[in-house]
């Protein structure tokens, strides 16, 4: 059954919006194409650790041809035994093991309904519109028949182009013991905590011809729906969410979007949220959350924090305000009016959902160790790279995690200066350089950025490529293009592609357009390929004769990565000279004739090529540094004296 | 104290008069300061010994790293600021020589054990009584048994720390919460620190009993284990010197954190300031041994006036023997 789009618009977008006490975004008009609209009624059973719900889904066919199938994410089934997630992860995710309490989502019914069907589930639709028995599980990514994270249904009637279909789905979400940021956990005192993500049946993305990698001349589009994997779980269409949650009265709820209604009756709290131009909805609930509020310009900030961490509430707000300020400057405005920060438990922390992020900290976290700030900034930046620039995380995780890591490092290092992550006397660790180091020290020649998340030959390469190398690649592009061009590129990319699903190709196209140059050489080597950059100053030779002093500087390319180089030589009389080299040859000699010999030769003097895996060999000096020897001799002997005094206490 | 008769401490009878006639804290501190004033060269010995050990490690270490950094051109930059990336490259390039160097430097550890035992014995010997006694004589004469005592206390320390870990582990198993993790961690550190300090005090007393009291190792061990419980005030004297020692150790660290030394002059000035602090640390160590020697002598001599004989008599006899030995050597 298809619906008139005008009626659908009235039902799903306009009417709920009229009643809003606070708008979900700062713009009145839709910012995305809103292909979907979800209306969900859900109730949390704390004892059974389940969420029973009914959802009404409206999907508009964006194609120019009929579409006769629908595909769904049933991602809670990832936490069933035998799923692809369990196989890939071995039942452990980022240091947290599955507790044995598996989860899953049970579809109780799925029907096509008409808009005048009244309240959800109040009237039984005609039996010929019941699709429950037509639902089949499919495995688009592997042959694991035990994986039930993707389902498909063939419609009795296709959905014509531009028309919409409304479905009603009854479901029960059985929450697992918390893993991969989903499920429940009890605190030692028995108080429960629920992180409810990937919990409701959700449509996949139908990609039309010309969208992402579907050829422009294709006859029809196709569903792009992936199974839930150990390292990726996000790709969905933008739309609206109207979600009513029913929880025990003493629970504090945090959720995606704006709270539009709240009432208490019979010991239960019923709260309604509305979110616009988002592609997911997650929520959390616990009776022990402490709630703090703050604001930044148009954004209402809400922090739900564990009581034992309340002393760190201000650190959360300070960090997220820095992130809001700097992303506004670097990329563009954060258009939503709310942001909820959640201090979760167990494996719930360090995750992004639309307008809701989980941060996490520990009791007594010292101010010089900014892990809280780092996680908060990172997850907030995901509101851009994931939230609004909704790339396909399964296929191009680097556009999501990598771009976020890059912007995160910029924010952390600019906001907190030297020692941005860890700053104690004698040891200062910055965010960007530490990510670069992590890339350099973990087999840099393995694992391309452009790789499907589950197809890395070595599992750990996912993290390296998607986070650390991506950040390093973007810093290198930053150094190559220059700050002004990089900023223009980032802003253009954001403004052009927000509320859509950009690809690597789209990002490259924007970079080329803004910089005015073909960047194939860069993307082919460092995004699609695994080239490694390592250049070295090989020798500096000086010859003197009657005509003057000649210095010969030989530089070498040690690995397969080619990158344009700048060689700076500094003469003994203090003068300096720079020459450019395309970096292609394996070796190149440069001759300098000057009144005095070359005292020092330096490749990449601005330290712009972050991808170079060994900076130490970029430079050669004929005169050793006496101050270094002296300083470190004194420093080491002082430290050794201190150590020996301490050791003496044991002897 | 048992009113029926003298108690035996480490096999040595100790009278009620001994505990009641213990020095005051002020006397204890004055004894240490007096020893320091009369024998300032001993602080220099402590400082120099420590510095030599430190240089024995740091010179080859810095030379190894220096070989890599010298012609890299990064030396001045690294002197000016910490650069994680370049240091990672340096350590990567220096991995093999540093590993080889570490294995070559392992001999430092047993040598340091010997030095610490010799230092303790030498200081106690030199700071006892009113006559000037040579540091080296005490260090040489009591070295072996001083080492044995040190090793016994090391074993006790390991067992004690194991017990602390087991205790805090049990508490942690019963009290599971994020707050508990923090407090249990703090408690583990505090208890371990107290254990190190307590055993350090006991070890000092045992060595005093060995060197000044001329007790055998077992007897000295027993005295050391019991003394802190019998003479509570010595604990306060020890704590006072320990506080000074902590300050003297923290000062170089604070200087390191606040002063950016990137030129030869600033590097030298910073080092000199740190060494002054470390010299004061050596003086604190000397002062503590002076206090300990004075305290032990006072308690022993006051105990000797009681009709129990024992410790005081044994010490007097030993001192007489030593005086005649020295007279013979001197002639």
Image: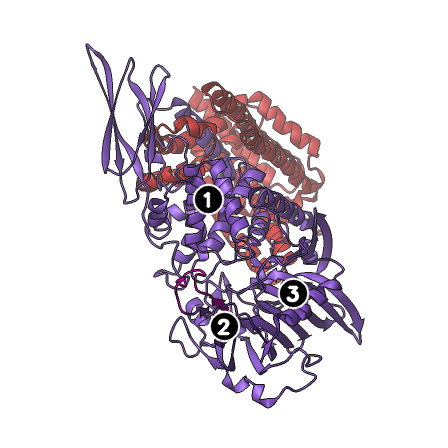
Residue A577 to residue B190: above or below: above
- Asked if labels 2 and 3 share a chain, the reply is yes
Is mark 2 in CB contact (under 8 Å) with mark 3? no
Which SS class for mark 1?
helix
Label located before the other in sequence (2 or 3): 2
Q: Secondary structure at mark 3?
A: strand
Residue drawn at point x = 60 percent, y = 57 percent:
A31
> Which residue, given by chain and number where applicable, does mark 3 sit on?
A284
Whether residue B216 is visible, yes or no, is no
Residue that badge 1 annotates: A434
**Mark 3 or mark 1, whichever is nearer to me:** 3
Residue B100 image-quadrant placement: top left
The chain whose colour is red is: B
Disc 2 marks which residue?
Answer: A78
Residue furthest out toward the top: A546
Q: Quadrant of residue B280?
A: top right
**Pointer 1 with pointer 2, Cβ within 8 A:** no
- Callout 2: chain: A
Q: Position of residue B282 (x, y in %)?
A: 53, 29
Separation of marks 3 and 1 at Cα, in angstroms? 32 Å
- Which mark is on residue A173? none
| Mark 1 or mark 2: whose residue is earlier in sequence | 2
Q: Colour of chain A?
A: purple
Q: Which residues are magenta?
A: A204-219
* Magenta portion: prevailing SS class: loop
Residue A378 to residue A453: above or below: above
Left or right: A269 as drawn, with respect to B227: right
Does dot 2 land on a helix, a strand or a loop? helix
Counting every numbered tag in the picture gives 3
Residue positioned 24% across, 37% down in the render: A585
């Amino acid at each position: 059954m298809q619906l008139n789009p005008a009626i659908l618009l009235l039902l799903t977008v306009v009417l709920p919006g009229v009643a809003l006490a606070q708008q979900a975004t700062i713009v009145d008009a839709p910012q995305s194409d809103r292909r979907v609209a979800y209306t969900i009624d859900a109730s949390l059973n704390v004892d059974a650790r389940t969420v029973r719900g009914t959802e009404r889904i409206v999907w508009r066919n964006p194609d120019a041809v009929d579409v006769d199938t629908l595909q769904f994410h049933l991602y809670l089934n990832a936490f069933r035994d035998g799923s692809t997630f369990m196989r890939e992860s071995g039942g452990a995710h980022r240091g947290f093991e599955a507790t044995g309490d598996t989860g899953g989502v049970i579809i109780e019914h799925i029907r096509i309904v008409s808009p005048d069907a009244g309240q959800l589930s109040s009237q039984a639709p005609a039996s010929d519109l019941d699709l429950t028995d037509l639902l089949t599980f499919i495995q688009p990514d592997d042959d694991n028949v035990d994986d039930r994270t993707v389902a498909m249904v063939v419609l009795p009637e296709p959905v014509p182009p531009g028309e919409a279909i409304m479905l009603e789905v009854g479901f029960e979400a059985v929450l697992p013991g918390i893993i991969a940021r989903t499920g429940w956990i009890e605190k030692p005192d028995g108080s429960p905590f629920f992180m409810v993500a990937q919990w409701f049946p959700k449509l996949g993305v139908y990609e039309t011809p010309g969208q992402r990698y579907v050829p422009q001349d294709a006859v029809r589009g196709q569903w792009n729906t992936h199974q839930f994997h150990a390292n990726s779980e996000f790709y969905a269409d933008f739309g609206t969410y109207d979600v009513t949650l029913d929880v025990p009265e003493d629970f504090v709820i945090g959720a995606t979007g704006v709270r539009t209604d709240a009432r208490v009756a019979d010991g239960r709290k019923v709260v309604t949220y509305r979110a616009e131009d988002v592609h997911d909805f997650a929520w959390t609930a616990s009776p022990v959350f402490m709630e703090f509020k703050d604001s930044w310009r148009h954004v209402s900030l809400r922090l739900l924090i564990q009581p034992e961490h309340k002393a760190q509430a201000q650190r959360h707000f300070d960090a997220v305000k820095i992130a809001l300020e700097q992303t506004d400057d670097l990329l563009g405005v954060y258009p939503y009016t709310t942001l909820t920060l959640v201090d979760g438990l167990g494996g719930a922390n360090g995750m992004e959902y639309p307008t809701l992020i989980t941060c996490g900290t520990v009791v007594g976290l010292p101010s010089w160790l900014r892990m809280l700030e780092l996680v908060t900034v990172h997850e907030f930046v995901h509101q851009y790279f994931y939230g609004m620039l909704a790339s396909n995380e399964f296929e191009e995780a680097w556009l999501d995690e990598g771009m976020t890591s890059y912007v995160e490092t910029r924010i952390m290092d600019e906001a907190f200066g030297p020692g941005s992550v860890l700053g104690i006397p004698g040891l200062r660790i910055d965010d960007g350089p530490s990510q670069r180091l992590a890339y350099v020290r973990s087999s840099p020649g393995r694992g391309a950025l452009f790789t499907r998340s589950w197809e890395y030959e070595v599992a750990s390469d996912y993290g390296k490529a998607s986070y650390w190398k991506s950040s390093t690649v973007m810093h290198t592009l930053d150094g190559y293009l220059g700050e002004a061009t990089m900023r223009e590129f980032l802003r253009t990319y954001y403004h052009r592609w927000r509320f859509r699903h950009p690809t690597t190709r789209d990002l490259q196209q924007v970079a080329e357009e803004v910089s005015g140059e073909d960047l194939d050489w860069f993307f082919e080597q460092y995004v699609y390929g695994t080239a490694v950059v390592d250049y070295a100053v090989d020798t500096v030779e000086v010859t003197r004769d009657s005509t003057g002093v000649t210095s010969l500087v030989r530089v070498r390319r040690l690995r397969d990565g080619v990158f344009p180089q700048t060689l700076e030589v500094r003469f003994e009389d203090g003068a300096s000279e720079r020459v450019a080299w395309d970096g292609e040859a394996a070796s190149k000699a440069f001759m300098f004739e000057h009144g005095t010999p070359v005292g020092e030769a330096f490749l990449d003097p601005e330290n712009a090529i972050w991808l170079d895996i060994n900076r130490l060999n970029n430079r050669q000096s004929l005169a050793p540094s006496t101050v270094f020897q002296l300083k470190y001799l004194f420093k080491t002997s002082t430290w050794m004296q201190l150590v020996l005094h301490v050791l003496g206490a044991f002897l | 104290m048992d009113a029926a008769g003298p108690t035996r401490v480490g096999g040595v009878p100790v009278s009620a008069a001994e505990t009641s006639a213990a020095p005051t804290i002020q006397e204890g501190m004055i004894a240490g300061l007096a020893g320091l004033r009369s024998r300032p060269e001993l602080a220099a010995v402590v400082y120099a010994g420590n510095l030599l050990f430190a240089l024995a490690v740091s010179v080859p270490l810095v030379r190894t790293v220096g070989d890599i950094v010298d012609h890299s051109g990064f030396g001045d930059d690294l002197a000016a600021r910490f650069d994680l990336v370049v240091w990672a490259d340096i350590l990567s390039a220096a991995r093999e020589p540093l590993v080889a160097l570490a294995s070559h430097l392992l001999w430092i550890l047993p040598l340091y054990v010997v030095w610490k035992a010799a230092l303790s014995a030498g200081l106690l010997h030199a700071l006892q009584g009113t006559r000037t006694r040579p540091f080296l004589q005490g260090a040489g004469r009591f070295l072996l048994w001083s080492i044995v005592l040190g090793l016994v206390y090391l074993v006790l320390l390991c067992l004690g720390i194991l017990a602390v870990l087991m205790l805090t582990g049990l508490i942690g198993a019963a009290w599971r919460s994020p707050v508990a993790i923090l407090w249990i961690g703090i408690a583990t550190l505090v208890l371990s620190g107290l254990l190190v300090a307590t055993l350090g005090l006991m070890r000092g007393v045992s060595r005093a009993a060995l060197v000044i009291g001329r007790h055998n190792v077992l007897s000295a061990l027993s005295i050391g284990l019991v003394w802190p419980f019998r003479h509570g005030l010595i604990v306060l004297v020890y704590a006072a010197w320990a506080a000074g020692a902590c300050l003297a150790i923290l000062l170089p660290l604070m200087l390191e954190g606040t002063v950016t030394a990137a030129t030869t002059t600033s590097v030298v000035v910073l080092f000199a300031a740190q060494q002054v602090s470390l010299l004061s640390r050596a003086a604190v160590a000397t002062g503590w041994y002076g206090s300990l020697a004075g305290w032990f002598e006072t308690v022993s001599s006051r105990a000797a006036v009681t009709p129990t004989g024992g410790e005081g008599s044994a010490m007097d006899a030993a001192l007489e023997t030593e005086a005649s030995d020295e007279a013979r050597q001197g002639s």
